Image (cartoon, helix red, strand yellow):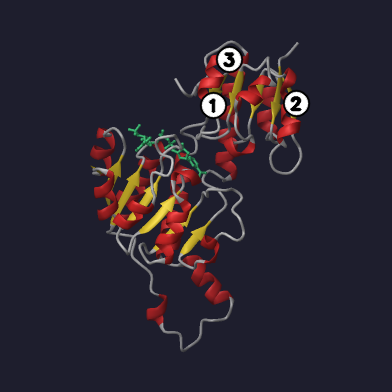
Amino acid sequence: MKPKIYSTYSIPVQVKDYMAQYCDIREWHGDGRTPRDILLEEIADVEGLYTGGSSMVGRIDEELLNHAPHLKVISNVSVGYNNFDVDAMTKRNVIGTNTPYVLDETVADLAFALILSTARRITELDRFVKEGSWKPTTNYREIYGKDVHSTTLGIIGMGRIGEAIARRAKFGFNMDVLYFNRNRKQAAEEKYGAEYCDLTSLLTRSDYIVLMTPLTPETFQIIGKEEFKLMKKSAVFINISRGQTVDEQALIHALQNGEIHGAGLDVFEKEPVDPTNPLLQMSNVVTVPHIGSATARTEAAMAMRAAENLVAVLTGKEPIDPVGK
Ligand code: NAP
């Protein structure tokens, strides 16, 4: 008998064909993620949980693990795994896996999409044109943007994705790259001329700041009131990591009080974002709905990598991407 697995979303056909050789699959076919009460029932007899992304499953905690006594592996279809209680999983010998590498370039593309649209006011001016406000009398000085090329980019979290952003910055936009990590990354310094600096120095010197760390207890609200005060008034702040790495109230305050120029946001403290969130009313803020890796090609690659991780554990092999070790 094949081991049973549960998926919190409907698995792409090719990936499902591959997985079906090794396991019996049950899937959630409803909108959004599986409601928690249904999830807790569905996992009672499974050995594998396939999540469709960290936000598609919610917290993997003691309560969930208590409902899944046969569970061996939880395969996140995402690189972030801040939804895992790694200690609780380790205690029960449940292996967690993620999908690094296959999404790096796609997420780096989004970083530049947000940098460029915030700097050149693309979403604001798109509305301006479509609403018929572009007139022969339009004063062009009022719609000027900011240059991206030949400026300074600060990357907080120079990891896999951070490096893909640095490469675009250096070779595509002739930018100086600063970065802050807990550890120096010699390779990034050699390849992209990136300069390692402390957080204060990065914040005070950068024209564009991209936050790209994982969400951990250490990075929770790593950017808050004091950090926004250190930034240039002309700075653009981009967050693609997780909403909770930023103190969102402090971000709103900084934007409302002209402490920074603008922001590009893929992630929010609460997702989906509350429609009354003041960030949604600001023309100098570009927002997208957590789409860092959301292209058809990359999502398919992530789904397959997550499937390979899950199948590896269920067939007694080492997964490619174990986390928390
Ligand atoms: P990664 O390769 O592990 O890079 C993360 C970097 O952050 C590392 O270089 C790490 O360096 C640094 N870092 C960790 N803790 C830090 C701290 N306390 N202070 C300063 N730097 C710290 O991960 P990745 O693949 O690039 O992904 C990064 C994160 O992006 C993911 O965990 C996820 O949350 C987010 N993400 C979001 C989307 C989206 O759709 N918006 C998509 C993909 C990824 P040190 O260890 O030297 O500190």
**Disc 1, SS:** loop
Q: Is residue 85 left or right of residue 57?
A: left
Q: Which mark is residue 85?
A: 1
Question: Can you say whether 306 is above or below 215 in the image?
Answer: above
* Farthest bottom residue in view: 137
Residue position for label 2: 42
Q: Quadrant of ligand 1?
A: top left
* Amino acid under disc 1: Asp
* Amino acid under disc 2: Glu
Residue position for label 3: 92
Q: Position of residue 156 (x, y in %)?
A: 35, 44
Question: Can you say whether 184 is above or below 309 in the image?
Answer: below
Image quarter in which the C terminus is found: top left
Q: Are marks 2 and 3 in contact (CB under 8 Å)?
A: no
Image quarter in which the N terminus is found: top right
Instruction: Kindly report which numbered mark, 2 or 1, lies closer to the viewer in this rendering.
Output: 1
Crowding near the residue tagged with mark 3, few <14, some 14–19, many ≥20 C-alpha atoms within 10 Å: some
